[in-house]
Amino acid sequence: MRRKTMLRLGGALISLLTVGGVVVMLLPYFWMVSSSIKTGIEVFDLPIKWIPDEIQWVNYPNALSKGAFGVYFYNSFVVAFAVMAGNLVFCTLAGYGLAKFRFRHRELCFRLILSTLMLPLEIVLVPTFLVVRELGLVNTYGGLIAPLAVDAFGVFLMRQSIRDIPDSLIEAARMDGCSEFGIFWRIILPNCKPALGALALLAFRDNWDQFLWPFIVATTDDLKTFPLGLAQMEGIDSAAYHEIMALAVLGMIPAAFIFLFFQRAFVRGITLTGLKE
Amino acid sequence: MGREIGAGRASPSMIRRSASLLRRWVAGGGKRSLHSHLRWAGFFFVLPALIHLVIFKFYPMLQALRLSFFRYDLMSPPVFTGLENYKLLWENPLFHQSFWVSVKYMFGVSIPEWFFALGLALLLNRRMPGRAVIRLAYFFPIAMSQIVVAMVWKFMYHPFGLVNTILETFGVGRINWLSMEESALPALIAIGIWRGIPLFGVIYLAGLQAIPKEYHEAAIIDGAGVFQRFFYVTVPLLLPTIMFVMVLSLLSAVKVFLNPLVMTEGGPNGTTRVLPYFIYETGFAFFRMGEAAAASMVLFVFLFGLTLIQLRLLRRGGVE
């Protein structure tokens, strides 16, 4: 009997902890949304009113007019989609080559690719900038996109999932006279859709969010991405918290949308890069 | 302009020679006989990604090494100065400070992450009502942009922000978190932890779910309690995941740049100037490219050493 009450108490405690954790994780976001519909004075009112008496939708257009946010959003989408496309093409090709072919130095190629995980942009920032400058790509979309177009994580993810496709499928197609690229197109791609989806989502999220590289390579206003635009607006008008929060809410929407609709693929992508082997 | 910096080209024979040298240590493919066109096909599939990484990773890395021996300000041609840049760094108290700020941030963020994330994964792996919704709530922040997080937390840490409001109800006075030397770095570390827990929680959770139920059932039959099962079944089987999380959390913590930039500008008094920020500032604000490259090399050696140590531990842990 006593054991049972102990167990029940433990269970209640754990539930409490779980819910408390949710609050800690999400409270800042609630506060962000709540502040984005208040006036600049109300945001600091005590006690906190989570829903203000009068909802200030006007914060949104006001905030958007403080910079060329249409351009920034557009640039962010261009960069995110282009980098995503690059990753889908190059990482999948490389993943297929590494997973299903035997050739000299294959393991070396794989290790070389993986070793670039040790060379994040933060380390090769200066020389990457010099390379891009050498190519004449400073302040161009090409310069924003090119250095990010292949990610070793993507290659790893695609290799892992293509390895699970049975060889017999590929052999059968080869027997039937399908070309190597035809095999890639008709057999491999349809059979690794979940991994492709996960890769697309992760690439989109990471590059929608890209800050450091655009910060270095895009100095003109017409090439700035949303994170740069927001940081810049905050730098100029750092007291306008209600409007900054409105912009933050807008910046959150694409990521939130993707997460809510593709939650399973998203989580699978994160775990796929980490597990197996 | 910049001839010395950009013009060098790795010769193919050099690559071949080093490749064949490395091959001795690498279990080489190509033993099984296959039609030669298949080998070429495989290589061609890999080639585009490889070329990209050579241009945007390996070549810049070699250039960083080269540049670290030059004085270069983007305008006048680079001048070879030997080890001058490294000497300058060694004598620069700001660099020392920056290095230790990075070390503090890295371990300050990742060590709590290891434990909290595992705790979260254990919580979410239990059977409970509304588990799907609770998981959704925990994993949602993973999708959030860094810039959104930075903005929200800058506001949270405002003297009249939510953090102080909550602390006030517990009788703590209002603190200007981001502008005091003692509290700025801990404030950023707290954000890092808060942000990392769900991400590493997902990875742990997948690891937990991969453990076959039979092991736990067998342990229960043998009369093992909750804690015994955790330490003798869960932990050993989760070891590869644990190691992976350790490596990944450190690597991602050392890269932090956005938060110090937009929340504190490396201040107050350099207490949040992490190494990437130092590199950015030296290179792109003071135009001392050579010195910035030298600092990058130091950061690289540090990261490399750290990863090697972790891989060694990983091997010893019986994970191969």
Image (cartoon, coloured by chain):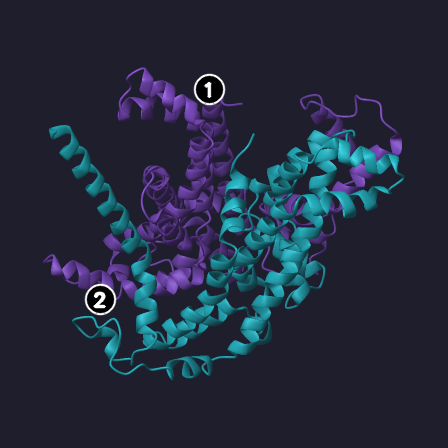
Chain colours: A cyan, B purple
Q: Nearer the viewer, residue B250 or B213?
A: B213
Q: Is residue A177 above or below residue A80?
A: above
Q: Position of residue A273 (x, y in %)?
A: 55, 41
Helix, strand or loop under label 2: loop
The alpha-carbon separation of the residues under discs 1 and 2 comes to 48 Å
Residue to which mark 2 is pinned? B159
Q: Position of residue B155 (x, y in %)?
A: 31, 66
Position of the C terminus of chain A, as image quadrant, is top right
Residue to which mark 1 is pinned? B316
Q: Image check: A143 left or right of B34?
A: left
Q: Is residue B3 above or below residue B116?
A: below
Q: Image check: B133 left or right of B143?
A: left
- Residue B77 in sight from this viewpoint: no
x 47%, y 40%: residue: B248
x 90%, y 39%: residue: A177
Local packing at callout 2 (Cα closer than 10 Å; few below 14, some 14-19, many 20+) is some
Local packing at callout 1 (Cα closer than 10 Å; few below 14, some 14-19, many 20+) is few
Dot placed on the residue nearer the N-terminal end, 1 or 2: 2
Q: Image check: B241 left or right of A42?
A: right
Mark identifier at residue A14: none
Q: Chain of mark 2?
A: B
Helix, strand or loop under label 1: helix
Amino acid type, callout 1: Arg
As drawn, which residue projects farthest toward the top?
A: B222
